[in-house]
Structures are given as structure tokens and as C-alpha cells.
Image: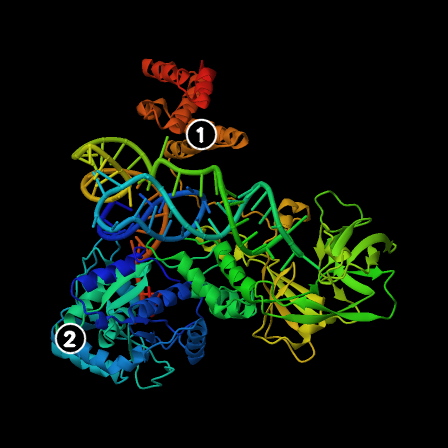
Amino acid sequence: MKESPEALNFIEQIIEEDLANGLPKDKLRFRFPPEPNGYLHIGHAASICLNFGLGEKYNAPVNLRFDDTNPAKEEQEYVDAIKRDISWLGFKWANECYSSDYFQQLYDWAVQLIKADKAYVDQQTSEQIAEQKGTPTTPGTASPYRDRPIEESLELFEKMKNGEFEKGAYLLRAKIDMASPNMHMRDPILYRIINAHHHRTGNDWCIYPMYDWAHGESDYIEHISHSLCTLEFKLHRELYDWYLDQIYDPANLRPKQREFARRNLSYTVMSKRKLLELVQKEVVSGWNDPRMPTISGLRRRGYTPDSIRKFSDLSGISKRDNVTDVSLLEYCIREDLNKTATRVMAVLDPVKLVLTNYPDGESEILHMENNPELPDSGTHEVPFSRELYIERADFQEEASKKFFRLALGTEVRLKSAYIIKADSVVKDDSGRITEIHCTVDLDSKSGTGTEASLRKVKGTLHWVSIEHAIKAEVREYDRLFLDEAPDSHEEKNFLEFINPDSLNVIKEAYLEPFLANATLEDKFQFQRLGYFTLDTDTTSDQLVFNKTVGLKDSWAKQNPQKEQAKPAAPAPQNQPKKNPLSEMQQLSKKLTNLPEEKYASTKANIQKLAEEISYEEIEPLFNTAAKKVGTRIGVMLILGVLIKKGLEKTEAAKAFIEAGLNDSNELLKTEAEAIG
RNA sequence: UGACCUAUGGUGUAACUGGCAACACGUCUGAUUUUGGUUCAGAAGAGUCUAGGUUCGAGCCCUAGUAGGUCAACCA
């Protein structure tokens, strides 16, 4: 995407400013620093696109750095998966780095800190330390070991390193400020003892640096100019800078930490911990379950790298908490696939259709466009015969005017084939339609140019020839959660919002034979249904397709009777609890623009709020600017309720009502009249 | 009750350093269409959290509020 030069996000603005202040452009260097303790998700994609995008924009190197300072949680499997995902997205890192590469340097610097009396070895339990830490509102107290002689700390630290102590027995702490309002500055831990096998350094170390100590110093070692992370690290910045101060040589580049808001997606969760829980509790089949918001899940589902990069692009970067609607992601993949996916036909819920005047036992080969969006994409062959399958939902015995599909006595075109007319149906004992008998207009064959072929009919249906169709399993997916923000409810666990119908498996779908040769890389549009791709579960004798996303369906929208069992998300329970007065003002604002029905309900809501609002509160609002009609109506409504409850009209109130009666706005006038 | 961050249509972001609040998604019309898709044309939707202030002029600057988020792991 070529963005216009003036639409810089705030990170780019910071960079431009640094450049303007003399930072040489060739000093620019970024990094993407995942911890290899889980799979990457769409939120990480935002960070990846940000960092690598900056690299592309400024022609600067971007390192991939694994933040592997906690061997208890990290595994090689995750390292591999992360590299695979970033490569798949289409980005190339300048260097593959590991925090563990710097363990020795970090250790040496730590010794230097001790020598400078900026760090000490503590030997209390975690409970004791936590207690001394204080709370955000009360200062902490010093550890009894805080003033341990430097020599002693040095000696103990070395013993820690040499594995002479049990896990948890000793710690190295920075000596900063136990009274700092920033909890991270209250003598943070630099090193702890962990007896676990590290996926890279094996058993070389038994002390491991904490995130804060490792991260900034790693940035410094790698000459990172801008270290970008998510907002929750904002408070760490002070510590990041303090650590840097201890070892910084002004001859070198000083890295700068800046924070942006993590990207959230509606109807899913986006924390590794929760995603891991979904995997462990077998809510999903694995990290790459097509319903997961992981990069690998999206890939398996049929999303393309381009679509994800586009999504990141359109979403932008800022510092405010956000929940981006999945519809934006879906738009990105539809837009991509519409231009590239091969058009094919598949019937997922079949009903048999017999063309009574088509010769029995015969068949013919028709030609179907591969992609109408790509003029040169050619055609492929589709067999046609007397007996076909169409979708059950594409036929109704009696049709309403708005039903553009097949009904008794109406005509419809079979895509790339003939125009047919339904004559009769055959039903089983339960009344279920088993066959639809039609006559075909043999002169109407697509592409022949005959007069009959050019006739316009209301609808076009997709179909497959029963005799030639191949069978496949098709998996359709719905959102994993029923709530827009499942993890935003304090009183409820996100698992309570799981959508029980997020997976719909169609064991026997019928596909045109062309699909027999599909590969995992292929993307298809099953015409009129959506975009599909082969799943990795496919075997030599069983095709399995995933539905990536449906087509936009304006018919389903105006025809909700067959309701997609999409229970409207429960009313948001975590609505910010505003005080009644400001809530009233909020509601009032929009009053003047509402359709009648909504006006009535909003009005009722405002009147309900009057219960909690006193006359004293609204009196100041009598002076509301004349322009703010909505607010004045709201105030009028509240006043009305209060008067009805027995409030005596004050002079100010009378004047306010009087003004309302003479106002040019009809709504305000009406409400004023109602009070009388 | 502390420190820090944030507040712009339903959603996500813009608005260069004060100058007509813009773009995309979503929604709704209409046209085109051998996909109820695509494409095309259009519409609705914001008093920029509140109250003050500075200014000829404030989404932007100042003051005071309000709401939301983050911080008290030997996680990152």
C-alpha cells in the first residue's frame, strides 16, 4: 500500500522527528522479539507488519529476536513455528537473534552493577519480597539484605551462577528505589535461579535474566534504534532506561522504547495464555485449528499473507484500546480471493433434480469460466447430465416474489448450462422433497449466442452432475465466541462464551470432478457459497475442504427466517458505568437524529434515568447552548418526570420550558408542551 | 486512595505546526450482473467524553472533572 506522505502513524512521526533531530537514517534498526512459548496470532501480525513495514519503508534491517530468558516455558517447536509464520507472511529478517546469545554479556554487566553498588543478592522468599514491595499506593520497605557488602554479593552471585544453590534460594536485585511510585523500580529482580533445560544453551546456565534486564540490553547490543512494544510495557520504560543508563556508552546508539496498543479482534481472544487454554482443554483441535486467530490457524483456514498484511495496514497503529471488528478481516480476505480464486461448483446440501426431457444415459462437457475477474484465466470442463444435485435451499414449491430461485412453474438458469423450468416434485412419506422434475430448454445453452440462450431469467443456480460428482468433507466455521469481547468480563470466564456451533462438518458434499486435483495451495470459490481451500487433513481417498469465508449474502440478510442461529451477543455487561447525568447527556446528544421508534425508546431510557437525577443536577443545564438541541430535549424530559413526581416549578424551570415552547425545533417544542 | 496512558460516526484510524472533521470497514438505496458475488453511482451516520479558559478561530493549547486501561509474577 502506498500511503500518502502525510498520513504517518505516531510511531512514524517519532522516527521522522528523530531523523530530523540528526539521527542518521542508516542507524535505523528494528526488531520483532517474540518469546518462543506459543504460536503467533493476528495481534502479533500487527506488530510484525509494523516492525517489518518500518524496515521496508526506511530500508532498515529488522532482527528477529527470540526472547528466550525463561527455559521453563520455551520450546524449540515454537521457535520453528514462529519462523515459519513470519516467512509465510512474506517478511525477511536481517538477523536471527536470541537473548540467550547474550547471557554471558548480561552476566558480566550484572557483575559490573554489583561492583557499582547498584545491585545486591537477596535471599528472602518470594512472599517476603512481595510483601516488602508495598502496593501502588504505599511505598515498599527495604530488604534486610539490601546493604549486603559488595564483596559478599559478588561472591554469592558467582555461587548462584555455579549452581551451588537451590532454585529460589537467592536472587540478584537491582538497587533502585523501594518508594518509587512505579512498582517496577522497587528493586526489580535481575536474575533468578531456574534449573531447567534451555532449548539453546542446554544446561550451561542455571541463572536466567528477567525480561527487563535482558530486553533493553539486547536492543543495545543489536543497535536497535526503536524498540516497539505494546502498551502494557509503558511502565517498564523507566526501568528500561535505568538499566541502559548503567551500561550505556555515548559512543553507541541508544535504543528507545515506544509503546503502541495491541490489536484485538472481535469474537475471539488474543492472549497466548488463553489460546493455550483453548488448545489444552481441547475446545479446538490445536494451535492451527481453523477457528483460531493464530497465523497458522488462519493459514489453514485459507487466509492469504496478503489479506493479513492488508488487514494490519487498514487497522493502523495507535495508543488506544481497541476491538477491531472481524468484518474488516473478512473484507480483506474476500477482496483478495475474489481476484484470485478459481470458480467451481459444489453442492453442500443436495436435492436431486431430474431433467425429464434430457436424454437418459447421455452427458456432455460444458465449459466454465475460471475467474470472471481475470479475463485470461481460461475455462475448465464440467460434465452435465440428466440427473443433477442443487442446493435444497434453492428450491421452494411456492415462491414469493423476492425468491429469485427455482419454484414450481418458474424458470432459472443452471450456471454455465441451460435454463430449466420446474414442473413437479416427488416427496417421501414425511413430505420431504426427494426429487424435482424439470424440463430443460435445450436451445438455451450458455455461450451459444442463440436467442434462447440470451433470455434473462430471475436466478442462476449452481449444480453438479450426480453421475460425475466427487464426494468430499466440507468444514464450515463460525466465530469461536458468542461475545464480542469474551475476555473483557470481570465476573465471567471467557470460556463461558464459547460458541457451541463454531464447527459444522458436512460429511458428504458433492463437488464437480475438477476439484479432484486440488492442492493445498489452491483457493477456490464455490460459486454462490464462499471461498474454500483444502485442509491438511485431506488424504489420498478423502478430500477435506475448509470454508475460509462466505460470500457477502444480501439474501440471507433480508431473509432471516432460517435464522443462522447467531444469537445476538448478550448485551454488553461491561458498559462503563457512567453517572446518570452524563449518561443522560450522552443519550440526549443523538436524540435529534433518531428515527421515530428509536426516539421513543431512547426517550424512555432517559426518563428512566430521571429516577436517579435530582433537580439540582439539571438546573445548570438549563443554560445549555441553544445549538445543543438534543441535550435540551433530554433535560426537558428529565424535568418533565421530576414535575410529574411533584416537583414545584422554579422560576428557572419555567423559563427553560418557555424557551422550549418557542424553539424552532419541533421535538423540543413537543416535549415542552407535554410538560405544559 | 498513587503513578502512568487513553478518550474523534456502530468499528478501526486520519486531520501537517490551531483554519470547512477525512478515509476504510459496516449499514442502507439505486444501476449493472449467467454468482442475491463483483463492479458502478449514491445516502445515512460525529455537535470530536464533560465544564470552563486562551484565541478572530480549538478535535488539537491550558485548567478542572468524568470514564476506561496499565502497574503490586523468581512471566514476557
Task: Answer with left or right where residue B32 lies relative to residue A62.
Answer: right
Q: Specify the label residue A114 is tagged with.
A: 2
Nearest to the observer: residue A591 or residue A185: A591
In the rendered image, the quadrant that contains the N terminus of chain A is bottom left
Mark 2 closeness class: few <14, some 14–19, many ≥20 residues within 10 Å: many
Location of residue A160 with respect to A391 vertically, above or below: below
The verdict on a common chain for dots 2 and 1 is: yes
Q: Specify the label residue A229 is tagged with.
A: none
For marks 2 and 1, give the CA distance.
68 Å
What type is the residue that disc 1 sits on?
A: Thr
**Displayed quadrant of residue A375:** bottom right
Task: Answer with left or right where residue A108 lies relative to residue A49.
Answer: left
Residue sitting at x 70%, y 72%: A381
The answer to whether residue A560 shows anywhere in this view is yes
Location of residue A369 with respect to A61 vertically, above or below: above
- Numbered disc 2: secondary structure: helix
**Displayed quadrant of residue A251:** bottom left
Residue sitting at x 30%, y 74%: A61
In the rendered image, the quadrant that contains the C terminus of chain A is top left
Q: Where residue A295 appears, x then y in whole percent? A: 47, 68
Task: Answer with left or right where residue A36 lies relative to residue A127.
Answer: right
Nearest to the observer: residue A164 or residue A424: A424
Residue at mark 1: chain: A
What type is the residue that disc 2 sits on?
A: Ile
Nearest to the observer: residue A75 or residue A137: A75
Q: Where residue A195 appears, x then y in whole percent? A: 34, 80
Residue at mark 2: chain: A
- Numbered disc 1: secondary structure: helix
Q: Where residue A568 appears, x then y in whole percent? A: 57, 47
Q: Where residue B62 appears, x then y in whole percent? A: 18, 42
Location of residue A480 with respect to A398 vertically, above or below: below
Q: Specify the label residue A592 is tagged with.
A: 1
